């Protein structure tokens, strides 16, 4: 361990020698201080706080991520190119100890920078919140500066798939479909079935049954929030639509209704508070929506209806969010060091950035996988085109998406800006998937490649 810590200290010295630590620290502090002046919000304290959290944490993550890749690639590749590694490697220290020492050095630098910038963001938020009126501050601490749990309706994927399969079998009996077009037909039928479960026609009602689970035991006398989002089939002259709500146990006194219709805008997330103690004895909350408009409204199954409830304080939730960002940095450090283990500095940097771009392109990969092809579709018929490369590329894209989603499934910035709870379980899962599993595999590959690299030969060929 003493040898590893010696390499860690050398990494710190290199970072200060190249002024990297000081430059990044100044940039981070400038972002924290400058962004509140530059950003525009909706004029509310809640909107400003959400945008401030999103922009500052995104900027911190981007700056730390790029500096981590640059330092990880440079601290190993530069040492080899400048013949410093040859001197270190002759000491009684194993190659894997050098690799781990550099990774620990980079991560300790990241920890210091993340604590510095994160502490400034938290202090700024608390300072601005303390200057607000009492009623506004109360609303802010109930909806943003808080850790709220979430409950949704049960997953209906199985029911959708079963109904789509039944409709497909009936259609194939009447009109056979070619093998090439079958995936697209399946997708279209599934989307139709899914749409029927989401649409509320004019004059109709829609009911959600949401199980609060174990949370019901500590939610007595605590108000909840409904988070709703819908799309409209047609535009409204006023830009909004009327909504009537009823929450509680049907045919009992435990009911809450809107006295007058709410006016809500489509394609927008709305949150409003409902009274406490409206669930039944099993913790199931029944929500009824009536559509008094002249057009159909669609509530997406993924995020159309959600119940939010208080679960903890903001400070600890914020710390857990920073910890997940730290896990991302650990993965980037392993990626950069692994690339530098067998490539020159410039090539390793290019390779690492290319991998980062691929990870950020997960939406494009997901669209290709969902459509089952990378070909260009026919705009007139709406049918996706197909390519011979699909046989190779689609399975490859599926594998890449599986790896990317190990990291992408955790979104601390979105959670913090919307006041959602980041649980210890989520943090533990993030550490396991991002650092231990994915980062561990990359680190093992980097250590093996670095151990097999012939330093003298590599240097002599230049």
Image (cartoon, grey):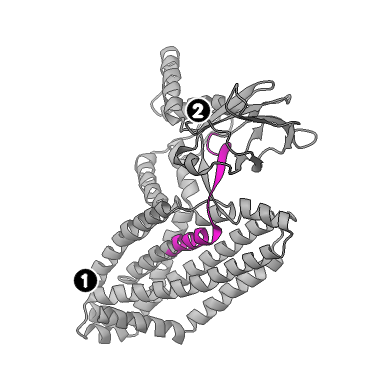
Quarter of the figure with the N terminus: bottom left
Left or right: residue 262 versus residue 412 is right
Q: Residue at x 51, y 58 (%)?
A: 317
Furthest residue to the top? 174
Q: Which residue is mark 1?
A: 452
Q: Is residue 238 above or below residue 61?
A: above
Q: Position of residue 445 (x, y in %)?
A: 27, 63
Q: Position of residue 260 (x, y in %)?
A: 76, 31
Q: Position of residue 101 (x, y in %)?
A: 31, 76
* Residue 374 seen from this side: no
Q: Secondary structure at mark 2?
A: helix
Relative depth, front residue between 104 and 47: 47
Q: Is residue 374 above or below residue 115?
A: above
Q: Position of residue 111 (x, y in %)?
A: 44, 72
Q: Is 38 inside the magenta-drawn segment? A: no
Q: Secondary structure at mark 1?
A: helix
Q: Residue at x 38, y 49 (%)?
A: 400
Q: Which residue is mark 2?
A: 188
Q: Classify residue 53 by image quadrant.
A: bottom right
Label 2: few (<14), some (14–19) or many (≥20) C-alpha neighbours in 10 Å: some
Quarter of the figure with the C terminus: bottom left
Furthest residue to the right? 237
Relative depth, front residue between 40 and 257: 257
Left or right: residue 240 versus residue 413 is right
Label 1: few (<14), some (14–19) or many (≥20) C-alpha neighbours in 10 Å: few
Query: Which residues make up the magenta segment?
Result: 301-326
Q: Classify residue 323 by image quadrant.
A: bottom left
Q: Earlier in the sequence, mark 2 or mark 1?
A: 2
């Amino acid at each position: 361990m003493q040898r590893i810590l010696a390499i860690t200290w050398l990494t710190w010295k290199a970072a200060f020698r190249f002024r990297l630590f000081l430059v990044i620290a100044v940039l981070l502090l400038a972002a924290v201080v400058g962004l509140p002046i530059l950003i525009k919000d909706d004029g509310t304290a809640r909107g400003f706080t959400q945008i401030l959290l999103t922009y500052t944490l995104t900027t911190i993550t981007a700056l730390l991520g790029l500096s981590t890749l640059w330092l990880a690639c440079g601290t190993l590749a530069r040492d080899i190119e400048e013949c410093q590694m040859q001197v270190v490697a002759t000491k009684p220290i194993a190659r894997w100890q050098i690799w781990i020492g550099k990774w620990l050095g980079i991560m300790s630098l990241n920890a210091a920078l993340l604590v510095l910038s994160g502490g400034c963001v938290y202090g700024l938020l608390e300072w601005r919140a303390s200057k607000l009126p009492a009623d506004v501050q109360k609303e802010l601490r109930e909806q943003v500066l808080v850790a709220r749990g979430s409950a949704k309706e049960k997953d209906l994927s199985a029911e959708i798939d079963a109904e789509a399969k039944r409709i497909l079998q009936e259609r194939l009996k009447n009109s056979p479909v070619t093998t090439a077009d079958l995936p697209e037909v399946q997708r279209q039928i599934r989307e139709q079935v899914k749409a029927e479960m989401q649409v509320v026609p004019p004059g109709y009602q829609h009911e959600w049954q949401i199980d609060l689970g174990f949370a019901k035991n500590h939610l007595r006398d605590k108000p909840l929030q409904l988070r709703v989002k819908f799309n409209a089939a047609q535009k409204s002259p006023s830009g909004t639509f009327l909504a009537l709500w009823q929450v509680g146990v049907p045919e009992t006194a435990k009911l809450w209704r809107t006295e007058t219709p709410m006016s809500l805008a489509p394609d927008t997330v709305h949150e409003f508070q409902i009274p406490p103690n409206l669930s039944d004895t099993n913790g199931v909350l029944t929500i009824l929506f009536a559509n008094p408009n002249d057009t159909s409204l669609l509530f997406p199954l993924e995020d159309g209806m959600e119940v939010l409830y208080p679960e903890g304080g903001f400070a600890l939730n914020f710390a857990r969010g920073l910890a997940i960002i730290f896990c991302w940095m650990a993965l980037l450090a392993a990626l950069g060091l692994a690339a530098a283990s067998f490539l020159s500095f410039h090539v390793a940097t290019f390779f690492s950035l290319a991998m980062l771009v691929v990870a950020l392109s997960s939406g494009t990969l997901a669209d290709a996988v969902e459509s089952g092809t990378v070909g260009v579709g026919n705009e007139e018929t709406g049918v996706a085109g197909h390519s011979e490369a699909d046989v190779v590329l689609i399975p490859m894209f599926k594998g890449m998406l599986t790896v990317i989603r190990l990291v992408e499934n955790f979104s601390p910035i979105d959670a913090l800006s919307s006041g959602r709870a980041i649980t210890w379980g989520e943090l533990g899962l993030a550490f396991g998937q991002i650092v231990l599993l994915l980062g561990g595999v990359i680190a093992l590959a980097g250590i093996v490649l670095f151990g097999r690299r012939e330093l003298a030969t590599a240097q002599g060929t230049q």
